Image (cartoon, coloured by chain):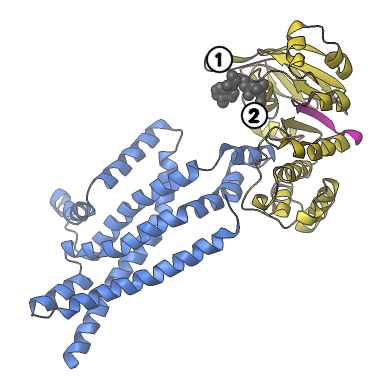
Chain colours: A yellow, B blue
Amino acid sequence: MSVISAKNVVKSFGKLDVLKDVSMEIEEGEVVALIGPSGSGKSTFLRSLINLETIDNGTIAIDGQTVVEKGVYKKSEENRGAYQKLGMVFQNFNLFPHKSVLENIILSPMLVNGKSRETAVKEAEELLAQVGLSDKIDAYPYQLSGGQQQRVAIARALAMNPKVMLFDEPTSALDPELTGEILKVIRDLAAKDMTMVIVTHEIEFAKNVADRVIFMAGGYIVEEGCAEEIIDNPQNERTQAFLKGFKR
Amino acid sequence: MDRFQEIIAALFEGFGINFLLFVVTLVVAIPLGLIIALGTMSSFKPLKYIMKTFVWIIRGTPLMLQLFVVFYAPGLLWGIPMRDRLMAAFIAFSINYAAYFSEIYRGGIESIPKGQYEAGQVLAMSKTQVFFKVVLFQVVKRIVPPMGNEIITLVKDTALARVIGVVEILMFAERFSKQGLIWPLFSTALYFLAFNGILTLLLGYVEKKLDYYKG
Ligand SMILES: Nc1ncnc2c1ncn2[C@@H]1O[C@H](COP(=O)(O)OP(=O)(O)O)[C@@H](O)[C@H]1O
Ligand SMILES: [Mg+2]
């Protein structure tokens, strides 16, 4: 069974049709890279999965639970549990500036999941070790580099124990020399069989880490398949043209 | 010397009224302003426009006029004269300052980036949790400086209550100058300066406390 199943998703902003008919199945343990030109609807699709955007039509099921069927949403209380299975990392980190690294991570586990402070702190410490930031536990976001902030954001998302992690261009706001540390964290997660959907312009990284690459353009999925196949030998001419822009 | 002490005591008593008006206005207007701010940001259009019009009227007319309206309207319109002048001042000041505060709150709330709400939502927080645990504190930090300005202005505005006959410090001071004394006017100034001095220090302290993070 797929952890994420999206069928015929349609979404527009006013007159602008952003997602015209997008279907996607994500299997447990799979790492999927979503690539495509800017404005093709990648972020909108990812945001639709986690309820940051409301779709106009289509069906989305998360871990077997249908949250929206043919454009009709189930009651929000019923959907809460399903959305909780997804974690999201944003391009701009969106850390809470008034909270320390530790507080950023433990806030939701305590508030939403009712964990004791002790448990939450212990888990946060483990996650910080995992992303290599144990020494920054008491720092505030403004004291960290972009790469460090993004690693905290990843730890914060992981603290909610998601089944699937969604990444929306996690390295795009970073200086080139800082992207490596984020990619390493994602690679580590892949090695632990975390299911991930990653919107990225790091083509080489997508090829190395993703099991599957999906190329989107103009609100449609134009081409998809095994990562190496798509990146080294694209069949569709739009994919070819897009990838040419990344010629190494 | 007796006369001196008597005047200082009278001024002190008068300033007590200004102080009381100041405290009551803050205690009422700080929460009332938040309610009005939430009203002006409501997605329920009729409420939003009623609240916005209300704020526009209050901010667009003199506080002195509002004092007259609150004091005279009950008597002239419904035949139940407002006997308690100080109560009229409490009401007019609270409403007036709540309207000003609401605009500061609204500006503060709207200045918080959308990403903060989204981060809270994807971490499974409810809207209420996001507001109280993520947004509110950041808003507080941003509004302390403009609120400080309004609060200092309020201290001076309390003197306006005399137009509806509230016996506050300026009324005493004027009474003494009519008897030929100039210095009570300066003593009055000292009361205001001292009080605003203390408030400025206090507000500076709060700002400093909130300055543990940037952004
Ligand atoms: N909230 C919004 N309101 C209006 N238009 C939007 C909104 N979000 C995205 N868009 C538009 O939708 C299109 C697709 O955007 P997006 O999903 O962000 O593309 P991508 O992530 O592939 O670059 C763009 O033209 C963008 O301007
Ligand atoms: Mg995008």
Q: Where residue B86 sits in the image (x, y, percent)?
A: 24, 65
Residue beneath disc 2? A75
Q: Nearer the viewer, residue A116 or B19?
A: B19
Q: Answer left or right for A248 relative to B197.
A: right
- Look at the image and say whether residue A197 sits in the magenta stretch: yes
Q: Nearer the viewer, residue A62 or B115?
A: B115
**Amino acid at pointer 2:** Lys
Measured along the vertical axis of the image, is residue A115 above or below residue B126? Answer: below
Q: Where residue A166 sits in the image (x, y, percent)?
A: 75, 31
State which quadrant residue B150 falls in. Answer: bottom left
State which quadrant residue B57 falls in. Answer: top left
Q: Is residue A225 visible?
A: no
Observer-side mark, 2 or 1, equals 1
- How far is mark 2 from mark 1, CA to CA? 27 Å
Measured along the vertical axis of the image, is residue A153 above or below residue A85? Answer: below
Q: Where residue B154 sits in the image (x, y, percent)?
A: 32, 61
Where in the image, quadrant-wise, is ligand 2 located? top right
Q: Is mark 1 within 8 Å of ligand 1?
A: yes
Going 17% across and 71% down the picture, which residue do you hit?
A: B171
Going 16% across and 62% down the picture, which residue do you hit?
A: B163
Q: Chain of mark 1?
A: A
**Amino acid at pointer 1:** Leu
Write down the region rendered in magenta: A190-202
Checking the image for residue A235, the label placed there is none
Q: Secondary structure at mark 1?
A: strand
Checking the image for residue A16, the label placed there is 1
Q: Earlier in the sequence, mark 2 or mark 1?
A: 1
Q: Secondary structure at mark 2?
A: loop
Q: Nearer the viewer, residue A223 or B120?
A: A223
Q: Is residue B171 visible?
A: yes
